[in-house]
Image (cartoon, rainbow, N blue to C red):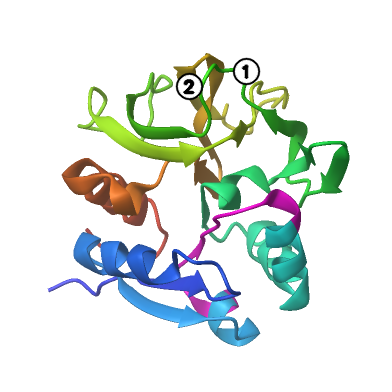
Amino acid sequence: MSARPTVAVLDYGSGNVHSAAKALTQAGAVVRLTRDKSAVLAADGLLVPGVGAFGAVMDQLNDVGAPQMIERRLAGGRPVLGICVGMQVMFDGGVEGETEHDGLAQWPGTVTRLQAPVLPHMGWNTVQPGEDSRLFAGIENERFYFVHTFAAKRWTLQTDPPFPQPVVTTAAYGEPFLAAVENGALCATQFHPEKSGRAGIRLLRNWLGTLPNTAH
């Protein structure tokens, strides 16, 4: 029997860490809730959850040294998955009201308020997976569960060969926005896989299947 992949769920104060850990376990991972640097760097995969305000999440991440841990993993090609605000903070910054907060700047762009008649965007929605998506393999037509008021709306990163082109998945609520990105070792979803039933578990299982040094 092949070994199950190990995933560190970054335990920095986010409210959805336990549901994310449970979903990853269902998907087939050995999960550890941790903020310990050595454990975060050693795991096959790192999941960065996030709920609430962009600025507050960044403050919590900074408090535990998460930006350096995430940067170190990505520099070594070690997979990271961000969820909800954990996706948003991967961009340059986020605007809340009149205040702009710095993000982790792994991707160019600014997270802004959705232009929609009713906010937050809360509930099930379809997505339009990008070509050759590995995250959405077999679940291209499923619905996923969203809870958010802000989003990244454009993908502007230019990638030149030999680096593979990122796979960008979109959704719409009032206007189009980025629902997921697959960019080398860094992947992220604006929706909550852990709240998306069987489709969400399948997406997490698909992500586990991309982790290196793991037989499937």
- Label 1 neighbour load within 10 Å: few <14, some 14-19, many 20+: few
Residue type, label 1: Gln
Percent of width and height locating residue 38: 61, 86
Q: Image quadrant of residue 194?
A: bottom left
The C terminus lies in which quarter of the figure?
bottom left
Above or below for 100 versus 29: above
Element type where label 1 sits in the image: loop
Residue range (magenta): 41-55
CA gap, disc 2 and disc 1: 15 Å
Q: Residue at x 38, y 30 (%)?
A: 133
Of residues 103 and 39, the one nearer the viewer is 103
Image quarter in which the N terminus is found: bottom left
Question: Helix, strand or loop at disc 2?
Answer: strand
Q: Is residue 209 above or below residue 122?
A: below
- Give the mark, 2 or 1, whose residue is nearer the N terminus: 1
Residue at numbered disc 1: 115
Q: Position of residue 86 (x, y in %)?
A: 58, 53
Image-quadrant location for residue 24: bottom left
Relative placement, left or right, of 97 versus 112 is right
Residue 74, percent across and down?
Answer: 65, 57
Residue shown at the point (78%, 46%) measured from the top left: 105
Q: Nearer the viewer, residue 204 or 59?
A: 59
The residue mark sitting in front, 2 or 1, is 1
Residue that badge 2 annotates:
170
Whether residue 93 appears in this view of the structure is yes
Position in image of residue 55 (x %, y %)? 76, 54
Amino acid type, mark 2: Thr
Is residue 13 positioned above or below 202 on the image? below
Q: Residue at x 56, y 18 (%)?
A: 116
Magenta span has 188? no
